[in-house]
Image (cartoon, grey):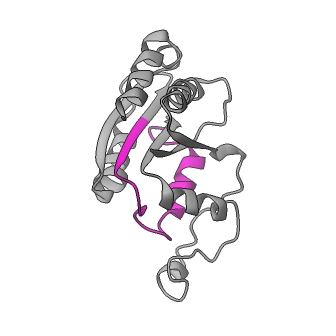
Amino acid sequence: MNILVLNGSPRVTGGTAAMVSAFVGAAREAGHDVNVIEIATKNIHGCLACEYCHTSGNGSCVQRDDMDEIYPLWDAAEMIVVASPIYYGSFSGQMHCLIHRTYAGGIPEQCRKMALFLCSGAHGVYSNAEGIYHGYLQGYFGVEDLGVYEGTTSECKSPKMALRLRNLAFSLG
């Protein structure tokens, strides 16, 4: 399976990174092709709402930045993992920019499955990010939801979470 992991955290040793690492290691071990996009290291501008993509752009964004390398991976992915820390009740700003820019291309062509990884400093702060995921990503795309995996930083870095994410990776077939 071709898997795209979108890591929206700028912290390379944080809880989100630990979740991504556990899943990606197991997915590769299980024989899947995995591309990880470290969004915080990319030059991705916010959507301009210019509608170029849906008029004369024919699905192409007017902006030339690092989204140009992500769009082909987005369309080729059979599974997409959205991984983000919770900032002010939702995804990181970097993740929001990427999500908004996917408007240009629309629904990923090959995607059939999605999962959501969320990390935060407290419990009970995930509902906004889950709403975006279920309402505007997984739900809107009409793809299978493989689950929402969430926890505090210590929970996300725990062997228990690593095992859950390894099991997810090996369950993909």
Q: Position of residue 31 (x, y in %)?
A: 50, 34
Pick the residue in front: 137 or 146.
146
Which residue is at a point 70% across and 70% down the rendered structure image?
64
Pick the residue in front: 132 or 28.
28
Q: Quadrant of residue 170?
A: top left
Q: Position of residue 118 (x, y in %)?
A: 45, 32
Q: Among all residues in the image, which is located at the extreme top? A: 159
* Residue 111 seen in render: yes
Which residue is at a point 69% across and 60% down the rendered structure image?
66
* Residue 7 seen in render: no
Which residue is at a point 49% across and 61% down the rendered structure image?
75
Magenta-tinted stretch: 87-116
- Pick the quarter of the image with the C terminus: top left
For residue 85, above or below residue 97:
above
In magenta stretch: residue 170: no
Q: Position of residue 153 (x, y in %)?
A: 52, 19
- Pick the quarter of the image with the N terminus: top left
In magenta stretch: residue 100: yes
Left or right placement of residue 46 versus residue 124 in this view: right
